[in-house]
């Protein structure tokens, strides 16, 4: 039984899972929208929200902590300079998961995970 064991294993060992999450969060922060499976998107949301929270802190220690996960300095610079100020007044919930149709090859459930737009480009309220 898996009592009190959090997180999905995603059919990989721990080092492969860690590398995959690092690559996924780097791609999400770089492109602001990616398509992946539902399980991966739900696990990615946890890591991505922590990275944006580190970006909102903005100090040098937070930048070094973000560099431990996101190994690309350009993406970390984008996180701290452009993405974090966008969510400064938002207490959480920086990502959105949208379900898609199943993948044709293996019938895996697909979804889009994207960063929520906060900077004035939202639809007008009626």
Image (cartoon, helix red, strand yellow):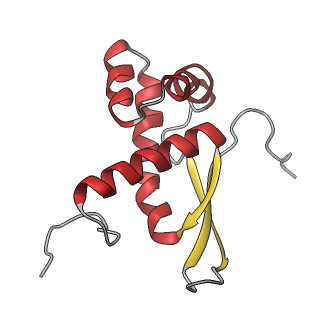
* Drawn side of residue 59 relative to residue 45, left or right: left
The location of residue 30, given as percent across then percent down, is: 60, 37
Q: Which residue is drawn at 83% across and 48% down?
A: 125
The location of residue 58, given as percent across then percent down, is: 44, 18
Q: Relative to residue 26, is residue 39 depicted above or below? A: below
Q: Relative to residue 18, is residue 76 depicted above or below? A: above
Q: Which residue is drawn at 40% across and 59% down?
A: 43
Q: In which quarter of the image is residue 12?
A: bottom left
Label tally: 0
Q: In which quarter of the image is residue 1?
A: bottom left
The location of residue 57, given as percent across then percent down, is: 41, 22
* Drawn side of residue 59 relative to residue 103, left or right: left
Q: In which quarter of the image is residue 49?
A: top left
Of 111 and 12, nearer the camera is 12
Of 70 and 119, nearer the camera is 70
Q: Relative to residue 119, is residue 32 depicted above or below? A: below
Q: Which residue is drawn at 31% across and 56% down?
A: 16
Q: Which residue lies furthest to the top in this view?
A: 60
């Amino acid at each position: 039984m898996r009592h009190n064991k959090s997180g999905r294993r995603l059919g990989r060992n721990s080092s492969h899972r860690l590398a995959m999450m690092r690559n996924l969060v780097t791609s999400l922060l770089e492109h602001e929208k990616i398509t992946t499976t539902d399980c991966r998107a739900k696990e990615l949301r946890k890591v991505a929200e922590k990275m944006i929270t580190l970006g909102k802190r903005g100090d040098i220690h937070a930048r070094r902590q973000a560099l431990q996960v996101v190994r690309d300095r350009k993406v970390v610079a984008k996180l701290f300079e452009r993405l974090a100020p966008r969510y400064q007044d938002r207490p959480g919930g920086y990502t959105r998961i949208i379900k898609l149709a199943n993948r044709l090859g293996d019938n895996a459930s697909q979804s889009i995970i994207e960063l929520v737009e906060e900077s004035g480009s939202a639809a007008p309220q009626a």
